[in-house]
Amino acid sequence: MMPWKDVCSSDDLQPDSGVCALVAGQQVAVFYRVKEQAVYAIHNYDPIGKANVLSRGMIGDVKGEPVVASPLYKQHFSLKTGVCIEDEQISVPVYPVRLHNGRVEIQVALSNNGEMKTSIHEEASV
Amino acid sequence: MSTKKSLVVIGNGMVGQHFLASLVASQCKDSYHITTFCEEPRAAYDRVHLSSFFSGKTAADLALADEDFFANNDITLHLGDKAANIDRNNKTVTSAKGLTIAYDTLVLATGSYPFVPPVPGHDRPNCLVYRTIEDLEAMASAAKTSKVGVVVGGGLLGLEAAKALTDLGLETHVVEFAPRLMAVQLDEGGGAMLRRKVEALGLQVHTGKNTTLITDGEQCVNKMCFADGEELETDIVLFSAGIRPRDDIARSCGLDVGPRGGIVIDNQCKTSDPAIYAIGECALWNGMIYGLVAPGYSMARTVVADLAGEEGSFTGADMSTKLKLMGVDVASIGDAHAKSQGALVYTYQNGASEVYKRLVVSQDKKQLLGAVLVGEVSGYGTLLQYCLNGIELPENPDSLILPPRGDESVGLGPDALPMSAQICSCYDVSKGAICQAIEAGAITLGALKAQTKAATGCGGCGALLKSVMDCELTKHGIAVSTDLCEHFPYTRQDLYNLVVVEQIKTFNDLLETHGKGSGCDICKPAIGSILASYWNEYVLAKEHLGLQDTNDTFLANMQKDGTYSVVPRITGGEISPDMLIALGQVGKKYQLYTKITGGQRVDLFGARVDQLPHIWKELIDAGFESGHAYGKSLRTVKSCVGSSWCRYGVDDSVGLAIELENRYKGLRSPHKLKFAVSGCTRECAEAQSKDVGVIATENGWNLYVCGNGGMKPRHADLFATGLDKETLIKYIDRFLIFYVRTAARLQRTSVWMENMEGGLDYLKSVVIDDKLGLCGQLEQQMTYVIDTYQCEWKTTIEDENKLKRFRHFINSDQPDDNVVFVEERGQIRPADEEERKHFKIMEVA
């Protein structure tokens, strides 16, 4: 199993909003939903708007699926799977993330050729 | 030499204009030089809605074509010049002003004139007709010194004219020769019901009256004497006793005309001279003159098809009508008088709610032949479709006019209509064409109207169009709902009221009590805006932060590469050299791209999120405050320099602009708000294109509301004139809060007002006359918002905790390496994808 990487204090998270963390050279958007006490981590790069902005998007749910809306052109990406709701061909990587002893921890792996591995279906949990 | 042929159109009325519009949209547009004569001083306008002239519409509002329609399409328009003579041998038209134009093809669209019965005294003072805008102006001018008005003629137009007289404030009578109102369209029962209803509205109806003389009155200007010996005193006599085709020009050049007038045409709308067509109310087809606009339009399209060498013929038209007369709904379909062989009649009469309905069906009860509806016409669309498409009637046809009992549904769903069914008769739009437009993405009524033109003529098919749209959308799985989103089954207005009534202060409280799920990017900003409008708390407070739209969360405007632009407030566009220098220094220090905005301020682009607090610290130290360019809130109050400097200035527009901007800055609203103040009627500040526009006049300030630029520009409406500053500000206070309270999400003031029942008049009655008794509350709310104003940037840079968010990474001070600028015209701009690749290679190397 991949090691958990310490990212920041859980106090650094923004309630019902997102922040961006630099983890193993990757930009990771971390979202915190207060009511569900849940954290989610996806890549920060918006493949449609082509900019590192997803952490600044608004979060919510579409038919129960937790999502972030891109701040550029408003497409929704599932926080669980990274799949774009408007175009299922497009998705962003998601990462396992947890709150542990008051810290935020994320698993990001580097593969042999230096590219990211993503664990699309592993649900982030607290 | 041009190879184009010459096409001349005589008459630029509704039908003439429809012909031109259809022609330039067709493939034979480039085959002709087009010339048109219009004897009126203005190009074609909407005569169908003429009476709206008295409820606030202007001649410009009624115009059918854009100002540049003629120029853009290379059509030579001779305004105020009447075609006087046709020389068929030499194929020329000569105008009253002496112009002679050669034609290859000639189209007569001369229309009709109002019939004035040859009663002695018909040409006395204040004896008027109702056809043109000049006629309306004459009515308005006569009405100023009049108390009583009589309309001669109780038909469709006569009742429209009666509404106009009532709107002018006159005691109004209708005198009709026939034994009932609307004798052509209604049967006896329908006519009687209509009479009861319009009489209840204050109209006095006299039927079966034959006017024999108009002479001097004793109390009024005129006195009408009737064959039965009765008399009626009136100041104005308005003739609306039918129309007659204007065929004099055709007559004098020897074209065939009917025994009772009208230029004879065949199925291609050709006259007895194959180079000459006639269309509209001047044309006689199969012994019939069509006095409605839809058949005229249909003739116009027939001629265009013929010119283009396409199949197409005019084979008569359906004369069914639905309209609102004096506020009473009336409709007539097909054979309303049951004259068809063996026709059977069903009648439903409800004296209590004053509804009358009559169905005329075939002997075998399978086909609908005609119908009359008075007082309740919601079934019109369905019945018309039964009639026009020969759809077989249900087993008990009377179920179509009986009120529904229990759950049974009596309407013919739009689903049952064939694709060929004509929905809009004015523009000949079929159900198929509408479905196609929906398929192509027109999924709102507005988009559908723009795309297909359906329901933009007489508007009678509006309800049917909506039901076709709703039905199609439902089939496509698109819910038709006024709910804000899946989390709140309420409109924005409902939610605003809930916040006020239950004094709810946070999104989560509202979600818990009235919503479900966890919200989304529709309801969160909408409710964030409501809470900010009502409570005016700091938008980045912990409980509100997650509700703010992208730009509000960082109090700046995100650009395509994820950087931000910064716009400090420059009230009224007034700025000292020192402040300009300070702005320039900040721009230079942070290497920002700078540009002057349309709202008379300066936009600084290319700021990284971590630079924003530093930039704002310097701006605030220099005396600037937030410009709210990121919010759905007041943006700018643009001004011209006004009386302080300008030779023509009437009042201090800059001073007022600054005062207004300082008063309303920070007010969160359903959409952005822009104001302007002009110092004189030259209007250099372009106030009439703003949500709130103010123009100085010798008599005080004139207030305009609900204009905007943008995707769909709209001229503002004149709301009040000659105001002192105190009254002006009071009206704007009330107007703004009423808008904030009642508009839909992201609805601009223009659309808000256009969708408001009663429109501008209603808005005036609420804001000026306090019809709803709300004005005290509205002003109080505005005072609260003004008293609780804060510069959000000042609050933010003073709070360590808030500043934590203004970093690209929560755990690193590195900037975003994807943000790359290149230089252009001496300033930065974001690198495009190619340039960025190049840059990254350079970096690696």
Image (spheres, rainbow, N blue to C red):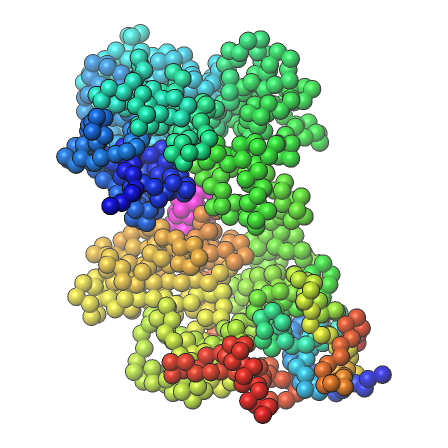
Identify whether A10 is placed above or below B431.
Answer: below
Residue at coordinates 67% horizontally, 43% vertically from top-left? B475
Identify whether B139 is placed above or below B176.
Answer: below
Location of residue B303 (image quadrant): top left
Along the horizontal axis of the image, is B533 left or right of B1?
right
All told, the count of numbered labels is: 0
Is residue A83 visible in the rendered structure shown here? yes
Along the horizontal axis of the image, is A26 left or right of B438?
right
Front residue (pair B803, B590): B590
Region of the chain picked out in magenta, as a range: B756-772
Please check the rendered image and state whether residue B470 is part of the magenta-colored stretch, yes or no. Answer: no
Query: In x, y percent, where is residue B67?
Result: 31, 48
Along the horizontal axis of the image, is B770 left or right of B465?
left
Quadrant location of the C terminus of chain B in the rendered image: bottom right
Query: In x, y percent, where is residue B35?
Result: 27, 39
Which residue ends up furthest to the left in the rendered image?
B98
Please check the rendered image and state whether residue B769 is part of the magenta-colored stretch, yes or no. Answer: yes
